[in-house]
Amino acid sequence: MQIARFKVGDKTRYGALEGMTIVEYAGTPFTMFRRGRRRYLLKHVVLLAPVLPSKIIGIGLNYGPCDFDQANTGSVSFNYALPIGKGKRFLGGAGPFTNRVVGGWQLAAVGTFKSGLPFTPTVGTDRANTGAGGQRPNVAGTPFVPQNLSCWFYTSANSLCKSLFPNAQDTFSVPALYTIGTGGRNILRADNLVQFDVSLLKDIPVTESKRFQFRAEFFNISNHPVFNAPGAAIDQGSGGQVSSTLNSNRIIEFAIKFIF
Protein backbone atom coordinates (compact mmCIF):
# COMPACT_ATOMS: atom_id res chain seq x y z
CA MET A 1 0.00 0.00 0.00
CA GLN A 2 1.28 3.44 -0.89
CA ILE A 3 0.36 6.89 0.45
CA ALA A 4 1.40 9.96 -1.53
CA ARG A 5 1.01 13.64 -0.69
CA PHE A 6 2.33 16.89 -2.02
CA LYS A 7 1.67 20.57 -1.54
CA VAL A 8 2.47 23.47 -3.83
CA GLY A 9 1.86 27.05 -2.74
CA ASP A 10 -1.03 27.91 -0.44
CA LYS A 11 -3.97 26.58 -2.41
CA THR A 12 -2.97 23.36 -4.14
CA ARG A 13 -3.04 20.14 -2.12
CA TYR A 14 -3.22 16.52 -3.10
CA GLY A 15 -3.39 13.26 -1.22
CA ALA A 16 -3.93 9.70 -2.39
CA LEU A 17 -4.20 6.26 -0.89
CA GLU A 18 -3.54 3.35 -3.23
CA GLY A 19 -3.44 -0.36 -2.60
CA MET A 20 -3.45 -3.69 -4.39
CA THR A 21 -4.57 -7.09 -3.13
CA ILE A 22 -3.66 -10.40 -4.75
CA VAL A 23 -5.82 -13.35 -3.73
CA GLU A 24 -4.80 -16.90 -4.65
CA TYR A 25 -7.21 -19.70 -3.83
CA ALA A 26 -5.34 -22.76 -2.59
CA GLY A 27 -5.87 -25.90 -4.63
CA THR A 28 -7.53 -24.03 -7.48
CA PRO A 29 -6.27 -22.35 -10.67
CA PHE A 30 -8.11 -19.13 -9.71
CA THR A 31 -6.27 -15.88 -9.03
CA MET A 32 -7.89 -12.50 -8.41
CA PHE A 33 -6.33 -9.03 -8.34
CA ARG A 34 -8.00 -6.04 -6.73
CA ARG A 35 -6.65 -2.53 -7.05
CA GLY A 36 -8.10 0.73 -5.78
CA ARG A 37 -7.30 4.36 -5.21
CA ARG A 38 -8.90 7.02 -3.10
CA ARG A 39 -7.99 10.63 -3.86
CA TYR A 40 -8.78 13.39 -1.44
CA LEU A 41 -8.27 17.13 -1.10
CA LEU A 42 -7.56 17.42 -4.78
CA LYS A 43 -7.80 21.18 -5.22
CA HIS A 44 -6.48 23.57 -7.78
CA VAL A 45 -6.60 27.29 -8.30
CA VAL A 46 -6.93 28.77 -11.76
CA LEU A 47 -6.78 32.47 -12.53
CA LEU A 48 -8.28 33.26 -15.91
CA ALA A 49 -7.07 36.41 -17.69
CA PRO A 50 -8.12 39.09 -18.08
CA VAL A 51 -8.90 39.66 -14.39
CA LEU A 52 -8.98 43.16 -12.92
CA PRO A 53 -7.45 43.67 -9.43
CA SER A 54 -10.88 44.68 -8.12
CA LYS A 55 -12.20 41.24 -9.14
CA ILE A 56 -9.51 39.09 -7.54
CA ILE A 57 -12.00 38.58 -4.71
CA GLY A 58 -13.37 35.81 -6.96
CA ILE A 59 -10.22 33.70 -6.57
CA GLY A 60 -11.95 31.61 -3.89
CA LEU A 61 -14.50 30.48 -6.46
CA ASN A 62 -11.68 28.83 -8.41
CA TYR A 63 -10.76 26.60 -5.48
CA GLY A 64 -12.17 23.19 -6.32
CA PRO A 65 -11.49 19.73 -7.79
CA CYS A 66 -9.07 19.44 -10.71
CA ASP A 67 -10.55 18.64 -14.11
CA PHE A 68 -9.14 15.09 -13.98
CA ASP A 69 -10.19 14.38 -10.38
CA GLN A 70 -11.78 10.96 -9.90
CA ALA A 71 -12.27 10.65 -6.17
CA ASN A 72 -12.62 6.87 -6.25
CA THR A 73 -11.11 4.43 -8.72
CA GLY A 74 -10.82 0.67 -8.52
CA SER A 75 -10.41 -2.45 -10.57
CA VAL A 76 -10.91 -6.17 -10.00
CA SER A 77 -9.43 -8.83 -12.25
CA PHE A 78 -9.12 -12.59 -12.31
CA ASN A 79 -7.59 -15.35 -14.40
CA TYR A 80 -9.14 -18.83 -14.29
CA ALA A 81 -7.83 -21.98 -15.96
CA LEU A 82 -10.93 -23.92 -16.95
CA PRO A 83 -10.89 -27.45 -15.42
CA ILE A 84 -11.55 -29.23 -18.70
CA GLY A 85 -9.30 -31.75 -20.43
CA LYS A 86 -6.88 -34.51 -19.62
CA GLY A 87 -6.24 -34.84 -15.88
CA LYS A 88 -8.84 -32.14 -15.07
CA ARG A 89 -12.20 -32.34 -13.32
CA PHE A 90 -14.20 -32.50 -16.55
CA LEU A 91 -13.28 -34.85 -19.43
CA GLY A 92 -10.23 -35.92 -17.45
CA GLY A 93 -9.86 -39.06 -19.55
CA ALA A 94 -9.97 -37.25 -22.88
CA GLY A 95 -7.79 -38.64 -25.64
CA PRO A 96 -5.06 -36.59 -27.40
CA PHE A 97 -7.33 -35.21 -30.13
CA THR A 98 -10.21 -34.35 -27.79
CA ASN A 99 -7.81 -32.78 -25.29
CA ARG A 100 -6.35 -30.50 -28.01
CA VAL A 101 -9.87 -29.20 -28.64
CA VAL A 102 -11.32 -28.85 -25.13
CA GLY A 103 -8.20 -28.52 -22.94
CA GLY A 104 -5.97 -25.56 -22.19
CA TRP A 105 -8.66 -22.85 -22.05
CA GLN A 106 -8.36 -19.86 -19.72
CA LEU A 107 -10.93 -17.21 -18.82
CA ALA A 108 -9.83 -13.73 -17.70
CA ALA A 109 -11.78 -10.59 -16.86
CA VAL A 110 -11.22 -7.05 -15.63
CA GLY A 111 -13.83 -4.82 -13.99
CA THR A 112 -13.06 -1.09 -13.91
CA PHE A 113 -14.87 1.39 -11.68
CA LYS A 114 -14.25 5.16 -11.56
CA SER A 115 -16.05 8.18 -10.19
CA GLY A 116 -17.40 10.64 -12.73
CA LEU A 117 -15.24 13.56 -13.82
CA PRO A 118 -16.18 17.02 -12.52
CA PHE A 119 -17.48 19.85 -14.68
CA THR A 120 -18.42 23.49 -14.18
CA PRO A 121 -21.83 25.03 -14.94
CA THR A 122 -21.42 28.16 -17.05
CA VAL A 123 -23.34 30.99 -18.68
CA GLY A 124 -23.26 31.49 -22.43
CA THR A 125 -22.56 35.25 -22.45
CA ASP A 126 -19.90 37.62 -21.14
CA ARG A 127 -21.81 38.96 -18.13
CA ALA A 128 -18.70 40.25 -16.33
CA ASN A 129 -17.52 42.15 -19.44
CA THR A 130 -14.01 40.66 -19.16
CA GLY A 131 -13.83 39.08 -22.61
CA ALA A 132 -13.31 35.65 -21.03
CA GLY A 133 -15.58 32.70 -21.74
CA GLY A 134 -16.80 30.00 -19.40
CA GLN A 135 -18.12 32.43 -16.79
CA ARG A 136 -20.09 31.04 -13.84
CA PRO A 137 -23.74 31.47 -12.92
CA ASN A 138 -25.07 32.43 -9.52
CA VAL A 139 -25.92 29.43 -7.35
CA ALA A 140 -28.53 29.55 -4.60
CA GLY A 141 -28.86 26.32 -2.67
CA THR A 142 -27.97 22.76 -3.65
CA PRO A 143 -28.36 22.03 -7.38
CA PHE A 144 -30.96 19.42 -8.34
CA VAL A 145 -29.08 16.70 -10.26
CA PRO A 146 -31.48 13.95 -11.44
CA GLN A 147 -28.81 12.49 -13.78
CA ASN A 148 -31.34 11.99 -16.55
CA LEU A 149 -29.85 12.02 -20.07
CA SER A 150 -32.23 14.81 -21.06
CA CYS A 151 -31.74 16.67 -17.78
CA TRP A 152 -28.52 15.74 -15.99
CA PHE A 153 -28.86 18.85 -13.84
CA TYR A 154 -31.94 21.03 -13.64
CA THR A 155 -32.16 24.33 -15.47
CA SER A 156 -35.44 25.85 -16.62
CA ALA A 157 -33.75 26.96 -19.87
CA ASN A 158 -33.93 23.28 -20.87
CA SER A 159 -37.56 22.60 -21.84
CA LEU A 160 -37.10 18.87 -21.26
CA CYS A 161 -36.10 19.54 -17.66
CA LYS A 162 -39.29 21.54 -17.16
CA SER A 163 -41.47 18.77 -18.59
CA LEU A 164 -39.71 15.97 -16.71
CA PHE A 165 -39.56 17.77 -13.37
CA PRO A 166 -42.34 20.38 -13.35
CA ASN A 167 -42.05 21.05 -9.62
CA ALA A 168 -38.28 21.60 -9.58
CA GLN A 169 -36.86 25.05 -8.89
CA ASP A 170 -33.84 26.75 -10.43
CA THR A 171 -30.74 26.97 -8.27
CA PHE A 172 -28.73 28.52 -11.11
CA SER A 173 -29.32 32.05 -12.41
CA VAL A 174 -27.57 34.42 -14.81
CA PRO A 175 -25.51 37.07 -12.96
CA ALA A 176 -26.30 40.75 -13.34
CA LEU A 177 -24.22 42.65 -15.89
CA TYR A 178 -20.65 43.46 -14.81
CA THR A 179 -20.72 40.95 -11.99
CA ILE A 180 -19.13 37.55 -11.41
CA GLY A 181 -21.38 34.62 -10.58
CA THR A 182 -21.18 32.90 -7.23
CA GLY A 183 -20.89 29.40 -8.70
CA GLY A 184 -17.77 27.41 -7.86
CA ARG A 185 -15.46 25.48 -10.11
CA ASN A 186 -16.20 21.83 -10.97
CA ILE A 187 -19.16 21.60 -8.58
CA LEU A 188 -21.01 18.90 -10.60
CA ARG A 189 -19.94 15.48 -11.84
CA ALA A 190 -20.54 13.45 -14.97
CA ASP A 191 -21.42 9.76 -15.19
CA ASN A 192 -19.49 7.11 -13.24
CA LEU A 193 -17.46 4.64 -15.30
CA VAL A 194 -18.33 0.95 -14.92
CA GLN A 195 -16.89 -1.43 -17.53
CA PHE A 196 -16.14 -5.14 -17.80
CA ASP A 197 -13.65 -6.63 -20.26
CA VAL A 198 -13.43 -10.40 -20.78
CA SER A 199 -10.96 -12.58 -22.67
CA LEU A 200 -10.93 -16.28 -23.50
CA LEU A 201 -7.63 -17.83 -24.56
CA LYS A 202 -6.30 -21.27 -25.41
CA ASP A 203 -2.79 -22.62 -25.81
CA ILE A 204 -2.34 -25.21 -28.57
CA PRO A 205 1.00 -27.00 -28.11
CA VAL A 206 2.99 -27.96 -31.20
CA THR A 207 6.21 -29.11 -29.55
CA GLU A 208 7.61 -28.74 -26.02
CA SER A 209 8.84 -25.21 -26.75
CA LYS A 210 6.43 -24.04 -29.45
CA ARG A 211 2.71 -23.39 -29.34
CA PHE A 212 -0.13 -21.42 -30.87
CA GLN A 213 -2.27 -19.20 -28.71
CA PHE A 214 -5.82 -18.29 -29.68
CA ARG A 215 -7.48 -15.27 -28.03
CA ALA A 216 -11.05 -13.95 -28.10
CA GLU A 217 -11.36 -10.57 -26.37
CA PHE A 218 -14.55 -8.70 -25.49
CA PHE A 219 -14.14 -5.06 -24.45
CA ASN A 220 -17.15 -3.54 -22.66
CA ILE A 221 -18.80 -6.94 -22.93
CA SER A 222 -22.07 -5.71 -21.40
CA ASN A 223 -22.20 -2.86 -23.95
CA HIS A 224 -22.82 -0.50 -21.01
CA PRO A 225 -22.60 3.19 -22.01
CA VAL A 226 -20.70 5.70 -19.89
CA PHE A 227 -21.83 9.22 -20.69
CA ASN A 228 -19.78 12.37 -21.12
CA ALA A 229 -20.59 15.55 -19.22
CA PRO A 230 -23.76 17.32 -20.41
CA GLY A 231 -24.03 20.76 -21.91
CA ALA A 232 -22.89 23.11 -19.15
CA ALA A 233 -24.55 26.43 -20.09
CA ILE A 234 -27.44 27.01 -17.68
CA ASP A 235 -29.04 29.68 -19.89
CA GLN A 236 -29.26 27.57 -23.05
CA GLY A 237 -31.68 24.86 -24.14
CA SER A 238 -28.87 22.31 -24.37
CA GLY A 239 -27.91 22.86 -20.72
CA GLY A 240 -28.04 19.58 -18.82
CA GLN A 241 -28.48 17.47 -21.95
CA VAL A 242 -26.09 14.55 -22.53
CA SER A 243 -25.15 14.07 -26.19
CA SER A 244 -22.18 11.66 -26.26
CA THR A 245 -20.54 8.71 -24.53
CA LEU A 246 -17.13 8.45 -22.91
CA ASN A 247 -16.48 4.79 -23.73
CA SER A 248 -16.82 2.77 -26.92
CA ASN A 249 -19.53 0.28 -27.78
CA ARG A 250 -18.77 -3.40 -27.30
CA ILE A 251 -15.65 -4.40 -29.25
CA ILE A 252 -14.87 -8.05 -30.08
CA GLU A 253 -11.42 -9.09 -31.30
CA PHE A 254 -10.01 -12.48 -32.32
CA ALA A 255 -6.31 -13.16 -32.59
CA ILE A 256 -3.89 -16.07 -32.95
CA LYS A 257 -0.15 -15.99 -32.42
CA PHE A 258 2.73 -18.45 -32.64
CA ILE A 259 4.99 -18.60 -29.56
CA PHE A 260 8.45 -20.11 -29.94
Image: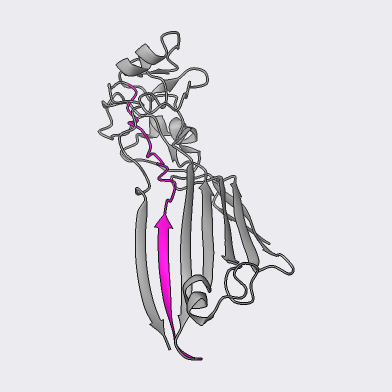
Whether 83 is among the magenta residues is no
Residue 143 or residue 216, whichever sits in front: 216
Q: Is residue 18 left or right of residue 98?
A: right
Return the residue found at the far right: 26
Give the main secondary structure of the magenta stretch. Answer: loop
Residue occupying image coordinates x 35% and y 12%? 163
Q: Is residue 56 above or below residue 3?
A: above
Q: Is residue 15 left or right of residue 96?
A: right
Visual colour scheme: one colour
Residue 184 or residue 145, whichever sits in front: 145
Residue 107 spot, x, y in % from top left = 53, 63
Task: Report the magenta residues as a range.
Answer: 208-234
Quadrant into which the C terminus falls: bottom left
Quadrant into which the N terminus falls: bottom right
Whether 211 is among the magenta residues is yes
Residue 31 or residue 187, whichever sits in front: 31
Residue 157 spot, x, y in % from top left = 31, 17
Q: Is residue 146 above or below residue 103?
A: above
- Which image quadrant for residue 161? top left
Q: Is residue 241 above or below residue 10?
A: above
Residue occupying image coordinates x 41% and y 57%? 218
Q: Is residue 72 visible?
A: yes
Residue occupying image coordinates x 47% and y 69%? 201
Return the residue found at the far bottom: 208
Residue 73 spot, x, y in % from top left = 55, 50
Residue 45 or residue 166, whichever sits in front: 166
Return the residue found at the far top: 167
- Which image quadrant for residue 170? top left
Residue occupying image coordinates x 57% and y 73%? 85
Q: Is residue 15 visible?
A: no
Numbered label tally: 0
